[in-house]
Amino acid sequence: MDSTTPTAPLAADAKAFKSFAEFYPFYLTEHSNRTCRRLHFAGSSLSLLCLAALVVTRNPWWLLAGLLCGYGFAWVGHFVFEKNKPASFKRPLYSFMGDWAMYKDIWSGKVKI
């Protein structure tokens, strides 16, 4: 991903995207640091486990735990390793969709961790 990441508009233009298909290449440029991507993957995986625990136990605290895992890991990745603001601050819905698209792309080998 690092050397083949598509060019995308500057971060200031994040609100100018008309579709998720336009946004996703930008999203990937905001995740060029491998440690950041690994933290996203870990947080998303833990969030899925929390979702499963929520369904099994019906304890709503698992929802909070899932949100904390997902966003906590991602935000550490951005602020500490990527040195940028998370895309969720600019485009929350597209960012959420991007998290899961990148998660799928990591599993499929399209994005390296």
Image: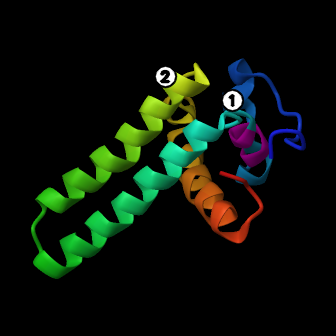
Kindly state the secondary structure of the residue where label 2 is placed: helix
**What residue is shown at x 59% (from left), y 47% (from top)?**
94
Left or right: where does residue 55 sit relative to residue 40?
left
- What is the three-letter code of the residue carrying label 1? Ala
**What residue is shown at x 71% (from left), y 51% (from top)?**
20
Q: Does residue 78 sit above or below 43 in this rendering? A: above
**What residue is shown at x 77% (from left), y 61% (from top)?**
110
Q: Give neighbour class at mark 2: few <14, some 14-19, many 20+ (Cα, 10 Å).
A: few
User: Which residue is disc 2 drawn over?
Assistant: 80
Q: Give neighbour class at mark 1: few <14, some 14-19, many 20+ (Cα, 10 Å).
A: some
Q: Which mark is residue 99?
A: none
Q: Nearer the viewer, mark 2 or mark 1?
A: 2
Residue 86 locus on image (x, y percent): 53, 30
Left or right: where does residue 3 sit relative to residue 88?
right
Q: Nearer the viewer, residue 28 or 111?
A: 111
- What is the three-letter code of the residue carrying label 2? Val
Which comes before the other along the chain, label 2 or label 1?
Answer: 1
For the stretch drawn in magenta, what is the main secondary structure?
helix
Residue 18 locus on image (x, y percent): 75, 43
The way the protein has been coloured in the rendering is rainbow
Is there a contact, CB below 8 Å, between mark 2 and mark 1? no
Left or right: where does residue 11 sit relative to residue 79?
right
User: Which residue is disc 1 drawn over?
Assistant: 14
From this viewpoint, which residue is outermost toward the bottom?
56
In magenta, the rendered stretch is: 24-28
Kindly state the secondary structure of the residue where label 1 is placed: helix
Q: Nearer the viewer, residue 27 or 110?
A: 110
Q: Reply yes or no: does residue 82 show up in magenta.
A: no
